[in-house]
Image (cartoon, rainbow, N blue to C red):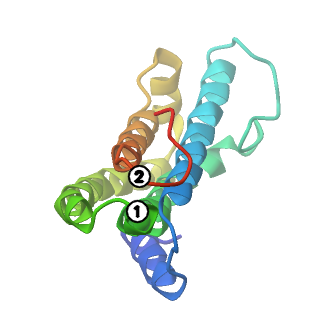
């Protein structure tokens, strides 16, 4: 299994081959994906806390939730490298002034770089054993939930830029 750093870099490399023509739609798309991840975490937490008996969650099943949770840090790293950061850069094609993007991008990039080691630490912990995260989920203190929320916040900050055309964000 690859590291979160590798997942991020692979995503950046793949995006170079398939550049975005517009950014806002990609930011909206990944915001929805982060929302799906959070919804699945809700499902898993409900199951672990005994509030739900369902066997089919939004992103996995009760039987393979450990596999999905172990992969989730890498999914988040990949989304940031393939969708969020390129989406911010492509906002210039949505009418956002280049100067605005040039001033915002370094901060977003640094926030992603700061998040990657924590995603990787979570991945490594989950690969050794998922029980600690299950225990945290039972008590409402999930590590991975916090990391997904931070990734979503980086993405949503990029979405806040006013555009001259394209759909308006409710965010």
Crowding near pointer 1: few (<14 within 10 Å), some, many (20+)? many
Q: Nearer the viewer, residue 157 or 2?
A: 157
Is the residue 67 above or below the residue 88 in the image? above
Q: Which residue is mark 2?
A: 163
Residue 102 position, x and y percent, is 20, 66
Q: Which of the 4 image quarters holds residue 37? A: top right
Residue 149 position, x and y percent, is 41, 37
Q: Which of the two discs, 1 and 2, sits closer to the camera?
A: 2
Q: Secondary structure at mark 2?
A: loop
Q: Which of the 4 image quarters holds residue 53? A: top right
Kindly report the distance in space between the C-alpha atoms of the residues bearing marks 1 and 2: 8 Å
Is the residue 81 above or below the residue 16 in the image? above
Counting residues from the N terminus, which is met first, the one under dot 1 or under dot 2? Answer: 1
On the rendered structure, is 99 left or right of 94? left
Residue 157 position, x and y percent, is 33, 44
Q: Residue at x 48, y 74 (%)?
A: 11
* Labelled pair 1, 2 in contact (Cβ < 8 Å): yes
Is the residue 161 above or below the residue 35 in the image? below
Q: Nearer the viewer, residue 65 or 24?
A: 24
Which numbered disc covers residue 122?
A: none
Farthest residue toward the bottom? Answer: 17
On the rendered structure, is 39 left or right of 137? right
Q: Residue at x 46, y 52 (%)?
A: 128
Residue 40 position, x and y percent, is 65, 35
Q: Which residue is mark 1?
A: 91
On the rendered structure, is 2 left or right of 143? right
Q: Residue at x 46, y 18 (%)?
A: 140
Crowding near pointer 2: few (<14 within 10 Å), some, many (20+)? some
Q: Residue at x 24, y 62 (%)?
A: 105
């Amino acid at each position: 299994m690859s590291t979160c750093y590798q997942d991020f870099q692979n995503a950046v490399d793949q995006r170079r081959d398939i550049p975005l023509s517009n950014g806002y739609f990609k930011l909206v798309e990944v915001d929805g994906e982060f929302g799906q991840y959070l919804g699945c975490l809700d499902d898993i937490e409900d199951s672990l806390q005994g509030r739900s008996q369902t066997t089919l969650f939004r992103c996995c099943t009760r039987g393979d939730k450990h596999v999905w949770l172990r992969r989730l840090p890498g999914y988040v790293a990949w989304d940031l490298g393939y969708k969020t950061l390129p989406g911010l850069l492509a906002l210039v094609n949505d009418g956002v002034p280049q100067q605005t993007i040039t001033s915002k991008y370094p901060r977003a990039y640094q926030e992603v770089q700061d998040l990657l080691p924590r995603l990787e630490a979570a991945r490594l912990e989950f690969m050794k054993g998922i029980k600690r995260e299950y225990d945290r989920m039972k008590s409402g203190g999930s590590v991975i939930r916090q990391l997904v929320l931070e990734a979503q916040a980086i993405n949503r900050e990029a979405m806040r830029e006013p555009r001259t055309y394209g759909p308006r964000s409710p965010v």
